[in-house]
Amino acid sequence: MALPAALPGAPGEGRAEARGLLPVPSALREVLPDGGLRRGTAVSVAGGDTGLLLALAAGVRETEGGWAAAVGLPDLGLAAAEGYGLDLRRLLVADDPGPHWAEVVSVLAGAVELVMLRPDGPVPPKLAARLAAVLRRSGCVLLVAGSWPGAALRLGVRSGRWFGLGDGHGQLTGRQVEVVAEGRGSAVRGLTARLWLPDEHGAVRPLPERPFQERPFPERELPEHALRPRPDQLRPIKVGPSQVGPAEEQSQPVTEPVAARAAAVV
């Protein structure tokens, strides 16, 4: 894969001391122990959730360089990446590097600030250690879709629910998830956050503590017996002469049901 000799704003080794954290969207800061992605480290996204991967990578556009790369992600949706906030003009893509993915990552780590990666199989610990040294020198953040030996931070989607589809029709409008993060050092204790990932606009944003529920109780039809009057609900009424024929001029008691009282069913 050919790269430009120098990318505008690309990080260099001499600036490693000045680097600290790579920013992330505000909705994800509370779930990260440091409030961002520590530069020069590898972060594992359990299950390879693409939405979480893109959301974590979106903060790179806030940096001075703003370059990112995607390696081994042929199904990555560019429209979705742009919706999360990535600048497609500063995104390098290596769809299928095959068994040479480690070499591609090593080269890209010196040219961009963040690399999204899906390895083509299990990663040997020795290979992960060699790439960790490359990351420390360059200050690049490696976001791995799946497990990674020695990852400084592990994130994943513990539960999720999509919205927008009806009975076999409709369009997906958003997904509510619970994201959990755990790792080494200050990240040993897991942190969680409830998010739209994404919302109806394709972005990530936090969920309120008590999200609005459109139909808090299911609708039920009242049983037939609730609408039928009981015997004690019947009372006599008098019918006047104008309402009956000559043979019925004398008032006679008749019965008429009182409106049924239907108890609410919850």
Image (cartoon, rainbow, N blue to C red):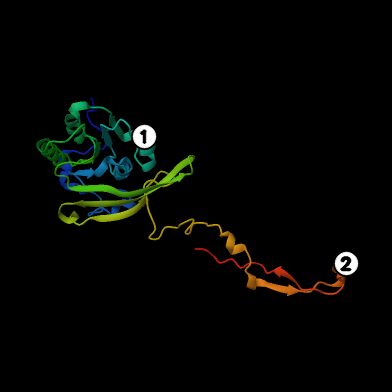
Q: How many marks?
A: 2
Give the foreground label among 1 and 2: 2
Q: Position of residue 39 (x, y in %)?
A: 20, 45
Q: Residues within 10 Å of mark 2 (few under 14, many from 20)?
A: few
Q: Amino acid at mark 2?
A: Gly
Q: Residue at x 48, y 43 (%)?
A: 167
The residue identified by callout 2 is: 245
Residue 62 visible in the displayed image: no
Give the structural element (helix, strand or loop) at label 1: helix
Q: Residue at x 27, y 54 (%)?
A: 31
The residue identified by callout 1 is: 78
Question: Which callout, 1 or 2, points at the residue further toward the start of the chain?
Answer: 1
Disc 1 to disc 2, how far (Cα)? 85 Å
Q: Quadrant of residue 232?
A: bottom right
Q: Position of residue 209 (x, y in %)?
A: 38, 60
Q: Amino acid at mark 1?
A: Leu
> Residue farthest to the top?
2
Give the structural element (helix, strand or loop) at label 2: loop
Q: Nearer the viewer, residue 248 or 112?
A: 248
In the picture, the quarter occupied by the N terminus is top left
Q: Is residue 164 left or right of residue 54?
A: right
Q: Is residue 144 left or right of residue 178?
A: left
Q: Residue at x 17, y 33 (%)?
A: 106
Q: Residue at x 62, y 69 (%)?
A: 230
> Residue farthest to the left?
126
